[in-house]
Amino acid sequence: MLYDTEGNGFVANATKIHCVGIIDLKTEEVLGFRPHQIKDALQLLSEAEERIGHNIQKHDEKLITKLHGALPGAKISDTFIIARTMFPNIKMTDTALIEAGKLTEKLRGKHSMKAWGMRLGEQKGDYAEVREEEARAKGIVDPREIADYVWGTFNEDLFDYMLQDCRTNLKLWKHLRPEEYPQAPLELEHRIAEVCDKMQEDGAPFR
């Protein structure tokens, strides 16, 4: 199952998951779960043999564990890690897309969902940018208050944004076809990323 979550912050400071989007890869049905349905979403994810998402190893899986307890063991396939492994030279190959106006220079070499959405013609939504502009138009200038305005509460625009992220990631998953790629390097890169994430979380003491 491919999934995405939206909450009110990053793992370290988040206190709630607003919504969850799930795509069953067998049927490609897109399912959306609002705040009162989070337990239903987690139950469905707990039944999956493989959970797929963009940056889920660093964010979504840990967010769920923090707020609702760890999901049962399953294969975790992170399209951010997979894309980075399979396309290490994408900064060079992006040149043609930039020249054709299909990718911005700012996104050259990036493996973000926004960058891949532009490359593949299935762009993610602009909810965050729109809400940030709304916040500033209302006179909100403090970064924390802007973040709270954008992510602090559930709304239908946020819900639609999340579902589009799922659709964009499905397009990426089909593009990657990781089942046709040697599995050993993909597994190794997932393990390395996990160690690096842990180091980043813990930090390093300096005297």
Image (cartoon, rainbow, N blue to C red):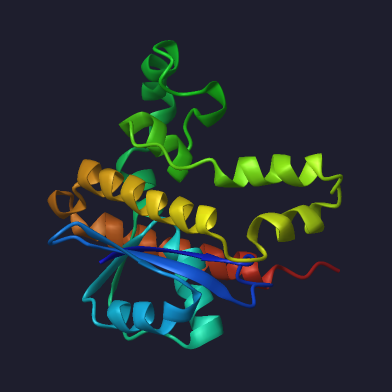
Q: Residue at x 31, y 77 (%)?
A: 45
Q: Nearer the viewer, residue 201 or 166?
A: 166
Q: Nearer the viewer, residue 57 or 172?
A: 172
Task: Classify 78 as above or below 40.
Answer: above
Left or right of 58, for residue 82? left
Q: Residue at x 32, y 86 (%)?
A: 72
Which quarter of the picture shows residue 84?
A: top left
Task: Classify 88 as above or below 71.
Answer: above
Q: Quadrant of the C terminus?
A: bottom right
Left or right of 23, for residue 133? right
Q: Is residue 71 visible?
A: yes
Q: Nearer the viewer, residue 145 or 197?
A: 145
Q: Residue at x 18, y 49 (%)?
A: 181
Q: Among all residues in the image, which is located at the extreme top?
A: 99
Q: Quadrant of the N terminus?
A: bottom left
The spot of residue 16 in percent (x, y) is: 59, 76
Q: Residue at x 32, y 49 (%)?
A: 167
Left or right of 132, for residue 122? left
Task: Classify 172 as above or below 102.
Answer: below
The spot of residue 39 in percent (x, y) is: 41, 84
Left or right of 12, for residue 154? left
User: How many numbered discs?
Assistant: 0
The spot of residue 23 in percent (x, y) is: 27, 61
Q: Nearer the viewer, residue 199 or 180?
A: 180
Q: Is residue 194 visible?
A: no
The spot of residue 97 in percent (x, y) is: 38, 19
